[in-house]
Image: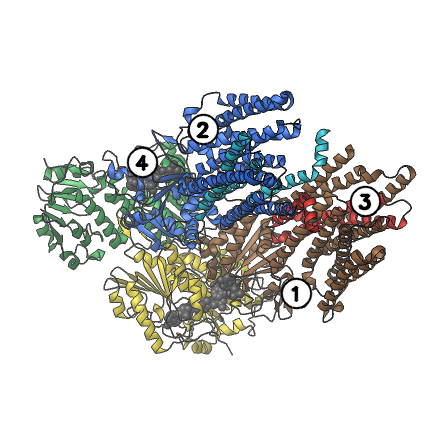
Chain colours: A yellow, B green, C brown, D blue, E red, F cyan
Amino acid sequence: MTIGLINEPQDSRVALTPSNFAKLATPGIAFIVEKGAGEAAFFPDSAYAEHARIVSRADLLREADLVVSIHPLSVSDYRKGTMAIALFQPFVDTTVAESLKNQGVTAFSLDMIPRTTLAQAMDILSSMAGIAGYQAVLLGAGSLSRFVPMMVTAAGTVKPSKVLVLGAGVAGLQAIATARRLGATVEAFDTRQAAKEEVQSLGAKFVEVEGAVDDRGAGGYAVQQSEEFLAKQRAEVQLRASKADLVICTAQVRGRKAPVLITADTVSQMRPGSVIVDLAASTGGNCESTQNDKTIQHEGVTIIGDSNLAARMPQDASTLFGNNVANFLKLFIKNETLNPDFNNEIISGSCIAKQS
Amino acid sequence: MTIGLINEPQDSRVALTPSNFAKLATPGIAFIVEKGAGEAAFFPDSAYAEHARIVSRADLLREADLVVSIHPLSVSDYRKGTMAIALFQPFVDTTVAESLKNQGVTAFSLDMIPRTTLAQAMDILSSMAGIAGYQAVLLGAGSLSRFVPMMVTAAGTVKPSKVLVLGAGVAGLQAIATARRLGATVEAFDTRQAAKEEVQSLGAKFVEVEGAVDDRGAGGYAVQQSEEFLAKQRAEVQLRASKADLVICTAQVRGRKAPVLITADTVSQMRPGSVIVDLAASTGGNCESTQNDKTIQHEGVTIIGDSNLAARMPQDASTLFGNNVANFLKLFIKNETLNPDFNNEIISGSCIAKQS
Amino acid sequence: MFSNYLLDILYLIASVTFVVGLRMLSHPDSARRGNQIAAIGMGLAVFGTLFFHPSADIETGQARVNKLLLIYSALGIGGFLGWRSAYKVKMTAMPQMVSLFNGLGGGCAALLAIAELKQQYSGHDPSVSALILVLFTIFFGSVSLTGSLLAFAKLEEVIKDSSITFSRHTLLNVALLALILSLIGYTVWGAGHAGMTWGLILFAVALVYGFSFVAPIGGADMPVVISVLNSFTGLTAAAAGIIYDNLAMLVGGILVGASGSILTVLMCKAMNRSLMNVLIGSFGGNAAAGGGKIAGDQTVKEINLSDAAVLLNYSQSVTIVPGYGLAVAQAQKICKELDDILDANGVEVRYAIHPVAGRMPGHMNVLLAEADVPYPKLFDLEEANEFLPKSDVVIVIGANDVVNPAALDDPSSPIYGMPVLQVWDAKSVIVMKRSMKSGYAGIENDLFFHPKTKMLFGDAKETLQKLVAEVKGL
Amino acid sequence: MFSNYLLDILYLIASVTFVVGLRMLSHPDSARRGNQIAAIGMGLAVFGTLFFHPSADIETGQARVNKLLLIYSALGIGGFLGWRSAYKVKMTAMPQMVSLFNGLGGGCAALLAIAELKQQYSGHDPSVSALILVLFTIFFGSVSLTGSLLAFAKLEEVIKDSSITFSRHTLLNVALLALILSLIGYTVWGAGHAGMTWGLILFAVALVYGFSFVAPIGGADMPVVISVLNSFTGLTAAAAGIIYDNLAMLVGGILVGASGSILTVLMCKAMNRSLMNVLIGSFGGNAAAGGGKIAGDQTVKEINLSDAAVLLNYSQSVTIVPGYGLAVAQAQKICKELDDILDANGVEVRYAIHPVAGRMPGHMNVLLAEADVPYPKLFDLEEANEFLPKSDVVIVIGANDVVNPAALDDPSSPIYGMPVLQVWDAKSVIVMKRSMKSGYAGIENDLFFHPKTKMLFGDAKETLQKLVAEVKGL
Amino acid sequence: MAIFEFIHNNILMIYLLAFSILLGIEVISKVPAVLHTPLMSGANAIHGVVLVGAIIVLFNASSTDYVSLSVGFLAVIFGTLNVVGGFAVTDRMLEMFKKKRK
Amino acid sequence: MAIFEFIHNNILMIYLLAFSILLGIEVISKVPAVLHTPLMSGANAIHGVVLVGAIIVLFNASSTDYVSLSVGFLAVIFGTLNVVGGFAVTDRMLEMFKKKRK
Ligand SMILES: NC(=O)c1ccc[n+]([C@@H]2O[C@H](COP(=O)([O-])OP(=O)(O)OC[C@H]3O[C@@H](n4cnc5c(N)ncnc54)[C@H](OP(=O)(O)O)[C@@H]3O)[C@@H](O)[C@H]2O)c1
Ligand SMILES: NC(=O)c1ccc[n+]([C@@H]2O[C@H](COP(=O)([O-])OP(=O)(O)OC[C@H]3O[C@@H](n4cnc5c(N)ncnc54)[C@H](OP(=O)(O)O)[C@@H]3O)[C@@H](O)[C@H]2O)c1
Ligand SMILES: NC(=O)c1ccc[n+]([C@@H]2O[C@H](COP(=O)([O-])OP(=O)(O)OC[C@H]3O[C@@H](n4cnc5c(N)ncnc54)[C@H](O)[C@@H]3O)[C@@H](O)[C@H]2O)c1
Ligand SMILES: NC(=O)c1ccc[n+]([C@@H]2O[C@H](COP(=O)([O-])OP(=O)(O)OC[C@H]3O[C@@H](n4cnc5c(N)ncnc54)[C@H](O)[C@@H]3O)[C@@H](O)[C@H]2O)c1
């Protein structure tokens, strides 16, 4: 059997790194890598060559029994009867599963891997979210027109910046940690009950809003919140944001449009020179004014809409992504070749289209 | 008398902020501000309007008796018999003093203010260097293709980045502090005897090279070092840099070309995805491959040459700059009007051209 | 005459060594030497008695030789048995050994009191005060004899606790005590020359009482009881000292009597039980279960701060396993402080970081970086599982799922297959958490019931602060 | 007869209270009660002596009345004076008071020894052992008398240290000591009935020796010397106790003798001086400068750790002024710890940050952020100079130029005109640095010589660690 | 009365008792819990000093009085066991504290 | 020889001495530096017990022997000063520890 790795010009990352191949290598499996797949992430073809054949996209699609990529290829590119691994995001692109099935492709969506404790080693959402949270703060602080830490200097005293983090998931928590490291005073919001303790466990202040819907048993994901609650929260956020220098938005409800937590006029109330980094941009953003994949100025406030910040540090991002995928692939490999066991809840859970 | 503040499109900062005018205001002095002077730094004309008249560049040059700007105007722009305050950098532009004199302008160069303990409140070099050091790390970390802090995650363990800081002056020290905050393991170099203790006082490791020329009494500035010493040092740097993920260059010897500490082939030995931020770019850079005001890729290593990083956070930068200038101007103001006392060593020290 | 003076001095030295010995015994660093010093003093006392005591040369010629033969053989036998049993017994069985020896000490006192009693009735009328002392000695001596022997039997689990008690046991004891007191009274003032016989009766009853005194007390409380009996024996020794006006005996006895009593109290404190409860054996029953909390059918062992402190401070290498609880408690800084102190005391301290410890990737790194723990001290899963078997103590601070053996050995567990830190490979494990509650995964953790594990309940920050204080105190 | 028994018991009680009292005196929480308990015991002893001592009713009728009058008036005078002076004296003068009272105690012993000596020579030949004891008492008693008085005078600064010493002083002392010993010897074995006179000569010489013994010792070492004399007096009391075979005196004296000696050693440790150095007064010279270093013509006052600890712990508000030295010592974390403890003990702690403290803009911010000092606790120059006058104690940790008064009041100074933290406005200032060296600006700092300032020399980190320990110890 | 007389005649003895008790208490007042057992064991060995008494008994017993002899004989054996065993066991317990801290 | 005899005759006394010394040492062995002065002062007050001796002297002095009387008189004054002043000063020193820390 043959596993093929795609080169994705639109993303600086790559789905598998040379060292992953080294770990996965078994007699029954051959690896092929599209030319230049890892260049942008500083993994030259030469490094892949040790374990894999470097081929063109066309050849790869022809030969591979299992095609691995970060973003899905256009369905038609997949050969009938092959397997495909990628972030298909069936919740966003609701038709993809269907069309893949029609194409006769068995597809596993990395974002559908159940978030059980056991599956954490394959939890790409977590690993990428972590990076995103970290990068969001670096980007935000860099774009901020002020110091983040407090500075008492001969030229005057600078007060520490206030950072507001919306959504204390993996990304949010990482953002909190990074912002605190830089010396900011950090506040965070979330609707999950557990979030309060988690936020405080990072030494940040948690801003509570009464009446959140209970969500235990939602497998760590947030549930839809009542409109009246969101209103309350928006009011609270309005207040905090207007005082904040840097706002990091990570609030998401999987499969739904991201909750809007910052209205346009909240933004106009913010101090000029402030910054909003919206990681939820791809699903509409937590800020009304956010434009996905764009950085705009809104009454002196810089609003960065980017849900793919992980791509800003391709090398480590690819390493983690690759490890996740590799751990996932390990489940496929039985007696030296590929045969996924669909009784395994991780495999079945992530399989969105099965060739019948 | 009238003090005029210039609008400098080429720099996002502004030399004085509205609050400075408030402090300086005295009956005998009028303020005029060029239109849009503070926009880029988020100080709208409306804010200036309280204390100053908003005028055009032409009017300003015509009316002002003292012209304040960050960067010098072309000499011809200054009216005869007026006073000018700016960063003239006579050491770089060796002719400027002369031509100003010919133009009949009394010029005070902010970078010539003696760096006595007393003058620290006006020490623009320090305040800007501090910002530059801070921004250098944010920029570097953001451009780095890897995590700075150590991360033990389900997707694998990431070792902390090594940051090497060349030159432990104000900028260098600030860079060290910021890098350590982000969780990097930091090494630093400098030739000043005192630097070792200063570096360690920030919890970083100091890399010593024997045989530095003694420099006490050089007023805090570094002195030219023996060629053989620099060679030794280059070797050492070569070694460290090749292991470093992020290199921050701040090594400068005022009035001289910056010492070259990183040769081109040191760069090629560095791990792909690494970053060099060279604050000494304007004076040639500490890295051979540096190109001033450009960001280049050299064998997978990103080299950022920028000596004006303070402009990346115009708001606070302008505030500090403004405070420095204001403190300086205070020296000029005697019995409610401008008459600089040339016996004051700070004024005389900074005066590079005196109308005779 | 001279020999007499010498004896005085030897006894004096002995007495002083007893004091000093005890003093040193109460500090870990000096304890061992203290014991040795006291032993030397004891040696001197015995030696002195053998050679310089006036009574040593009452007899002459053959008679003397026989007498000495007798004595030395007795010493030989006793010494041999004592030494051998002391070195045969395995560490865990030490307490019963102590109990046994203590009982014999008591027996010794009782016996010599009887002999003395015999003396008293040979010839002239016995003096009241002397009689009282003698009977007192017989009483306490024999109580501590049978009491200790029973304690020994219980600890050896030769006898099951419950088997020998019955309701109203306390009543019986009170009755016996009354009987004994009246016996003493009668012997002294009523019995006249029949006193000897009555003395023997007292002896017999006392033996019974000693047994019945310990009978209702639970195995877990044994140490306390032994300590009580220990001070009893001390008192008998003192009494005997007065009888023979022998200062070494007097001082030695009193010292043990006093310190023994205090010690008893301290022990009760440490187990937080009241002495009364222990002696009435009111909840001997559950206490028998090792004083620990009962969870399901299993029981967990708790460790107190000072034991934990010593355990850590005197080990070669300690591994700290931080978890989400460390973050919740925000205890990273004080944790680092513990690290520093141990380090200063020559203990190697390492941190084992589990990939998913905490609630976000790198959670522990953030914490420990905040506390300035140098990177080289941090080890990830693989590295850690390498050296864990080699470390003496593991402190698990607010971690749970990441050290759950179920991940390895319980296929039914939701976390089965997740790699975990195998802390149970270390020599011993201390787990700090507030309760027996489960962690993120919401599952039970058998580690807490592992024989090597001791729990240290409480908020991580507070506990660590106290612990640091304890270690500094050592 | 009965009264005798009662007296026995009163003395016994007294002795026990002495022990218990001392015990409690050695812990801050119980110290005060301990002192009171001992006082009560003393009361009992005196009371008992007055009413139950056999000698109390040697005389009868008028003679007795007179005698009692005499005694009570003496008690009255002594009591009144003692009480009054004790409550008049101001806190700072306490040590000399102690010294004074100690001297009088010694004097008392010496006097009664002389009286006893007289007794010895009235009638039958004196017993050797008794004589020795008496002379011993006279000797130590009088030494502690004059010695203490001199110590008192020195502390009161009635006498300048140097004024009364001269080279070879030690030699003189040795000579005197030799003379005294031979005097004792002669009186006991040689003088026969002339002993009384010789005893008085001994008395005189001893008085001189006491004076000359203390003469060369510097003011800073006085506490140690007083402690030494204190245990001397203790011994005399014990000796007197033997003479009158009075157990209360014996025990009380011995206790003080023993604990006094230990205390002396502890004190030397605390000042890290060796007892020898102190007694030979080898560096009495510099010690005379209040233990401080002499810089130029001015002298600085040092403060020891425990005093600093008390000063901080019992004040309302403390302001910490960090400087470059804090960074160099990397003492930010332990500094925060001190902050925490004080905070927990109800002291308000604030940080005053000077704009150019350290070596880079915001240097102190970086440090304190690392130690997690909350931003609201940080105040910049203007704010700080506002509240400094209101704070009880300022701790300057490794700062120098930024707290240099020259910036305000010395136009010739290179830093004249630079704004500085006016720490001298606070009630008292503690400066932590390693030496008298200057800072970045390389200029002297008069703050160190300011009357309100006390120096605490040493590396900031180590000093702070010790200080934290001390405060915890309170 | 008698008791008072007794006290008066043995006053020194009583002081000694009192102080021994104080010492006994003082000396172990702040012992860490880990040392409870070893300390108990050590104390246990110390009260083995009764052995001295036993020896004296044996010495005093006339060589015809077999009762006393055998009683004393037994007593000595017991006492020795107490002493030797006690100290030995304690020593073994304390081995763990051997490791010196630097 | 004499010394041995002395010891033998006063053996109890000597035990008492030994133990008192041990107690004296034991009792203050771990006193914090802050308490050095108060402790010294307290001890100083305790040895004022010589006062007892002084009183006895005065009692014993025959009412004609003016030397002894005056000596004793002085001694009692000194002693009382030592006792009363000693305890009082100590008490004042220790007042500062009253402030209970929460
Ligand atoms: N790292 C990640 O990216 C990530 C993300 C999401 C979930 N998770 C999950 O989180 C878990 C992490 O494991 P873990 O062992 O670190 O944490 P854990 O399994 O959640 O256990 C934490 C333990 O700390 C104790 N605790 C809480 N507060 C405490 C306090 N103040 N003082 C002392 N103890 C305290 C709790 O017991 P008491 O209540 O009895 O005190 C709890 O059992 C794993 O199950 C992992 O799958 C990890
Ligand atoms: N902030 C800035 O941007 C900047 C930049 C350049 C220069 N400066 C200058 O630096 C100075 C800063 O003032 P400052 O008061 O913070 O520092 P400072 O005046 O330089 O004094 C620091 C003091 O700390 C003591 N010290 C050093 N190491 C120590 C240790 N390990 N433990 C205890 N004490 C230690 C030194 O005395 P010992 O040697 O006796 O211990 C020294 O006197 C000003 O003169 C300022 O002008 C500031
Ligand atoms: N089982 C595991 O071991 C495991 C692994 C990874 C993550 N998780 C958990 O899953 C949870 C979600 O992870 P994620 O980062 O992918 O979540 P996410 O990216 O889907 O959402 C980010 C955060 O936004 C929050 N949010 C949603 N609506 C909001 C609103 N209206 N206002 C404010 N906040 C809102 C959510 O609560 C969530 O915390 C985390 O708590 C994480 O701990 C568990
Ligand atoms: N008097 C004051 O209060 C005051 C105020 C501000 C700055 N200063 C001092 O002035 C000094 C210089 O400040 P700066 O940052 O403007 O200096 P700079 O910007 O001129 O130079 C930066 C650093 O590069 C170093 N350097 C020069 N040649 C080098 C070489 N070959 N290799 C390595 N390093 C080399 C210099 O030593 C200096 O530390 C600092 O130490 C600062 O403390 C003093």
Q: Horizontally, is E93 left or right of C362 in the view?
A: right
Nearest the viewer among A314 and C294 is: C294
**Residue that numbered label 4 is attached to:** D446
Residue F38 pos. (x, y %): 48, 43
Q: Are marks 3 and 2 in contact (CB under 8 Å)?
A: no
Q: Label 4 lies in what chain?
A: D
Q: Is residue C244 visible?
A: yes
Are the numbered discs 1 and 3 placed on the same chain, yes or no?
Answer: no
**Residue that numbered label 1 is attached to:** C287
Residue C448 pos. (x, y %): 60, 63
Q: CA distance from mark 4 to mark 3?
A: 78 Å
Amino acid at pointer 2: Gly
How busy is the neighbourhood of tag 1: few (under 14 within 10 Å), some, or many (20 plus)?
Answer: many
Q: Horizontally, is A260 left or right of C362 in the view?
A: left
Q: Nearer the viewer, mark 2 or mark 4?
A: 2
**Residue that numbered label 3 is attached to:** E55
Give the SS element for disc 2: helix
Nearest the viewer among C218 and B84 is: C218
* Residue A282: mark in rendering: none
Q: Label 1 lies in what chain?
A: C
Give the SS element for disc 1: helix
